[in-house]
Amino acid sequence: MSKDRLIIFDTTMRDGEQSPGASMTRDEKIRIARALERLNVDVIEAGFAIASPGDFEAVKAVAETVKNCAVASLARAAYRDIEEAAAALKNAVRPRIHTFIATSPIHMQYKLQMTPEQVLDQAVRSVKQARGHTDDVEFSCEDASRSEFDFLCRIIEAVIAAGATTINLPDTVGYGEPGQYGEFIGRLIRTVPNADKAIFSVHCHNDLGLAVANSLSAVMHGARQVECTINGLGERAGNASLEEIVMAVRTRADVFPVETRIVTEEIVPASRLVSSITGFPVQPNKAIVGANAFAHEAGIHQDGVLKHRETYEIMRAQDVGWSTNRLVLGKHSGRAAVRARFEELGISFETPEELESAFKRFKELADKKHEIFDEDLQAIAGTVGSEDEAERYQFVALEAISHTGEKPRATVTLSIDGVERQSYAEGDGPVDAVFKAIENEVHSGTKLLLFSINAITTGTDSQAEVMVRLERDARIVNGAGADTDIIVASAKAYLHALNVMGGAVRAHPQIGGI
């Protein structure tokens, strides 16, 4: 019996970017787009074209880069939004305009201050406008899970008649319950007269930890597109996790009447790339991509797995890409080999100078640790194009001293606007002393919200990847730094965050979303 195709719509670069501090540059979006193309997702939502000039350029660049997936831009149901989306997608091989308007009573009354009839008219007008630019138009009923059923039926029927080819029914605030939400989707599909003329989609948020369950329940009731993100990234508690959706459908093929075209071996590499770029580490017990996802501690489990893997493992680790994380290079490797491996990982550099900088950092790292892994190369690539640019604050050197019974202290040398300065401070620990020494010079006025350390690879010589989250005047940014020395990685991460804070205003202002 043949199965229906489940369309995987990835919104890591749009909804995922709305996580506080998770803004991505144009080049970072291109790197993620290439990873998603290797993953073989069906649709890549590259951003919100009208949000800013930076977002427009990022959507445009992704549209020009991706050849094997549809590329979408989000747009409110407004004339300028749709025109900007169309312009950004002009050179896409398969462009999709994704337009939306809120349909719940609370949103229509308090946010839009529009009547249901006005909302319906604007939705139809916007879909027709979008159809003038592309045959692939998606329409979303924002806050669908709290919308009135009869009104949803009216607006869905009208926008399908106007040319919408995909209808998305978001659980925007994570309010859904799997049994209720799935039945709700199925009832809409059965009730709307022209439902057979469109694909029905779901976009679930994880506020109650039910995003994946709600999405899969909707699939069982007729939804044939799921909108999701790598690592479940997204604002508030995040979105439905792409890797969990895909592997649930694949592993429980006996239950789900659908299949995806995802190249599952690319899941872990994509997960690590997104984590590296955003600075959001993956928790060890995260399903599919967490470090402990295939680890067995209990003796009875270990014995069972050794005798017959299926006793305690329902998936093979190599099927999601764990076996691909092998060591690739050493300190005797030359430029050609390093460049080739970067390209295999989907990493390219804009200029020969950037490649040379990456190779120099590779050599410096190879002198510190014998074996270089793919994750190390991704961490190196994440620093090229940031520290090499004319950023105000750059790390030069540090000395940190910590003795039991004595106050830890640190001396930091940093470059500010090209001038080297040295600063000394004491702290509750060596990292605290380093941060205070930096602040003695920069006086940033920021508040440290989060500090986390993650080992990039295994072994005592592993690089530490540090993420720092800073806040000032309600603006939140992330900074990331990597080094075999945790203290140095911490200093680099702090300075990176300060540079981001002092740079351009957030590329993705909060102007709405689904």
Image: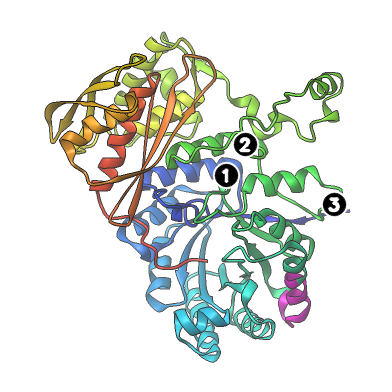
Mark 2 vs 1, N-terminal side? 1
**Label 1 sits on what residue type?**
Asn
Q: Residue at x 65, y 64 (%)?
A: 202
Mark 1 vs 3, N-terminal side? 1
Left or right: residue 164 versus residue 388 is right
Q: Are marks 3 and 2 in contact (CB under 8 Å)?
A: no
| Residue reaching furthest to the front | 405
Q: Residue at x 30, y 60 (%)?
A: 53
Left or right: residue 353 versus residue 149 is left
- Circle 1 SS class: helix
The residue identified by callout 1 is 231
Q: Residues within 10 Å of mark 2 (few under 14, many from 20)?
A: many
Q: State the CA–CA distance, disc 2 to disc 1.
A: 8 Å
Percent position of residue 122, x then y: 49, 84
Q: Residues within 10 Å of mark 1 (few under 14, many from 20)?
A: many
Q: Main secondary structure of the magenta part?
A: helix
The residue identified by callout 3 is 255
Tally of numbered tags: 3
Q: Which residues are magenta?
A: 184-195
Q: State the CA–CA distance, disc 1 to disc 3.
A: 24 Å
Q: Is residue 40 magenta?
A: no
Residue 289's tag is: 2
Percent position of residue 62, x then y: 44, 51
